[in-house]
Structure formats: structure tokens, C-alpha cells
Amino acid sequence: MLAVAVVFVFVVTTVSILTSIHHIEEGHVGVYWRGGALLNKTTEPGYRLKMPFIDRVANIQITMQTDSVTNIPCGTSGGVTVYFEKIEVVNRLKKQNVHNTILNYGENYDKLWIYEKIHHEINQFCSKHSLQQVYIDLFDELDESLMQSLQEGCDKYDTGIEIITVRVTKPKIPELLRQNYEKVEAEKTRLMVAVQTQTVVEKEAETERKRATIEAEKLAQVSKIQIQQQVYEKDAKKKMSEIEDTMHLAREKSRSDAEYYKRTREAEANAKMLTPQYLKMMLIKSLMNNSKIYYGDSIPKMLINLEANELKDYFQA
């Protein structure tokens, strides 16, 4: 009996030790319940101990996770029922809020604040808008509005949940309506292509006009520069001619002044030289230079008498 008791105690001890050892995964926080009551402690990743058969432990993820809400029906303001196949919400529970969030909203806190909240917001959105708005006009804004609404609800009740992003797939609509929308989109696409083609043609024409204008302006500028250059050259030639004329006039004036001065000085010198004695000497020289020699038996007396008489008259004077 003693051996059986020892074996029993050993088995019980071993099982207790094995059931008390557990591990918390990386990116998670361990929370504990004892007798259904949430304990105040939380544990970090790694191997940990708990009360065997009494405590219950759960791994609560604190890294980013993606919650997918599928097959969400909603009715538009016009009475058409559409289905959102999948809406993905990327979220994260802040580490410092783990205990309070689990205490207030339970281990499946995301069911209340994400899954059920998505259903509520989608139905509110559809009921206020027409099919055209839900399917086409406002669809590109739906993910942002959902993200904002989810975050506002989580912040209001201090859940510690951070909404990272929301991805919404295109809703399913009745097949006939879908075909009509496809036709409309095809027509819109053709219209856009036509408009874009027209825009391209207009832009090309405008570009050509601008190119021609720029070319004409360039030619005009070149012509203007050439004309200005010619004007400058003519002005320069005119100024050079004026300078040359001025220099020539100055030279001629200097030469004339010099000639005048020379003549004046010569006249003054001649005036001083024209004395009676000088004139008599010049007359004698002139007569001597003009003397003639005649050979023969009869020498003209008239010439000798004329010359003698001229000398006599001169000296008497």
C-alpha cells in the first residue's frame, strides 16, 4: 500500500508540474484567470508557471493583426441588397491596455469593436446612400470613413485598439445591374478616350502655335538686333567721319594759319626791305641782267639813250 501511495503522489506531482508549466509566444502577453476571475498580473514571452488545474492562461497578441469580416449584407436607400464579400481591418492592441481591455471586453474584444462594428457601419452607410453612390461614387472613400469611425469608437471607450488600415472589396450587386454598370463604364471610358484624344490634338496644335510664335519672336529679335547693329555701325561711321572732318578742318586751319603767318611775315620783311637804296640796287641788277651786247658798225643809239635816260630818271627820283 505504501508503494502505491508513493507512486500516486509522484504521478500527481509530475502531472501538476507539467500542467503548471506553459509558454507565452513572442508578440503576445499572457493573461490569467483563476476560478473565472481575471488576475491582475500579465507575463512576458517565454516559459512561465501557473497554478495547476486552477489557473487558465491566454496569449493576447500585441503585434499587428488582420481581422477579416466576410459576407456583409446591406440594403441601399433604394432598396437594393448588396453584399461586401470581405473587409480587412489591420489593427493592434497596445501593450499597456491589455489588462483593462480584457477585463472590460473579454478575450475576444475584437468581435465587439471590429466585427460587429464593421457590420453596423456598413449598414449605416448603405441605408443613407443610393446604389450608384455605394457602388461607384463614394466607394473610394469607404475605407477611410470606416477607419475613422472604428478608431473614434475605440478611442471613446479607451480600448487601446489602434486601427492601422481598412481594405474594402467591391460589393456584389445583382447581375443585371452589374452588366448595366459595366456598359456605362465602357461608355465613360470611350468618352474619356475621345476627350483625351481631343485634348492631345488641342495641346499639339497649341504647342505648334507656341513654337511658331517663339520662332517668329526669335526672328523678330534677330532682325531687331541686326537693325540695331546696322544703326550702331552707321552711327559709328558717322562719328568717325565727323571726327575725320574735324581733324581735316583743324589741319587745314593750321596750314592756312601757318601760310597766313608766313605771308604776313614775308610781307613785313619785304616792307622793311623796300628802301630807296634797296630799290636802286635791284634796278641796277635788273638792268645789268637785261643788258645786251651788239656787234656791228652801227649800234642803235636809241637803246643806249633809253637806258641812260631810265637810269637818270631813277637816280633823280
Image (tube, helix red, strand yellow):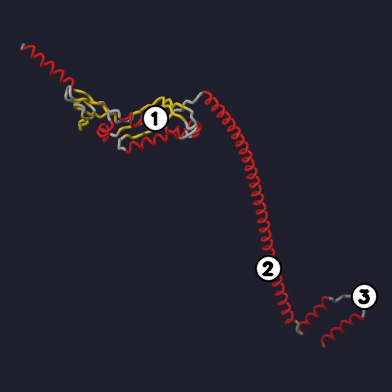
Q: Are marks 3 and 1 in contact (CB under 8 Å)?
A: no
Give the residue number, with chain letter if any, for mark 2. Answer: 250
Which residue extends farthest left?
A: 2
In three-dimensional space, the C-alpha distance between marks 3 and 1, rounded to whole angstroms, equals 171 Å
**Which one is earlier in the sequence, the residue at label 2 or at label 1?**
1
Q: Mark 2: which amino acid?
A: Ala
Considering the image in quadrants, where does the N terminus appear?
A: top left
Location of residue 98 in the rendering, given as x and y in whole percent from the top left corner: 26, 33
Task: Choose top left, top right, bottom left or bottom right for residue 142.
Answer: top left
Q: Residues within 10 Å of mark 3 (few under 14, many from 20)?
A: few
Relative to 236, 61 lies left or right: left
Q: Are marks 2 and 1 in contact (CB under 8 Å)?
A: no
Location of residue 266 in the rendering, given as x and y in whole percent from the top left corner: 72, 77
What label does residue 119 carry, if any?
Answer: 1
Location of residue 256 in the rendering, given as x and y in whole percent from the top left corner: 71, 71
Numbered disc in front, either 2 or 1? 1
Numbered disc in front, either 3 or 1? 1
Q: Mark 3: which amino acid?
A: Gly
The image shows residue 70, relative to residue 245, as above or below, that is above
Give the residue number, with chain letter if any, for mark 3. Answer: 296
**Which one is earlier in the sequence, the residue at label 2 or at label 3?**
2
**Which one is earlier in the sequence, the residue at label 3 or at label 1?**
1
Relative to 155, 194 lies left or right: right
Which residue corresponds to the image point at 30% horizontal and 37% vertical from the top-left? 158
Task: Choose top left, top right, bottom left or bottom right for residue 246.
Answer: bottom right
Which residue extends farthest right?
A: 298
Considering the image in quadrants, where does the C terminus appear?
A: bottom right
Foreground pick, 215 / 261? 215
The image shows residue 307, relative to residue 187, as above or below, that is below
Which residue corresponds to the image point at 36% horizontal and 28% vertical from the top-left? 67
Local secondary structure at mark 1: helix
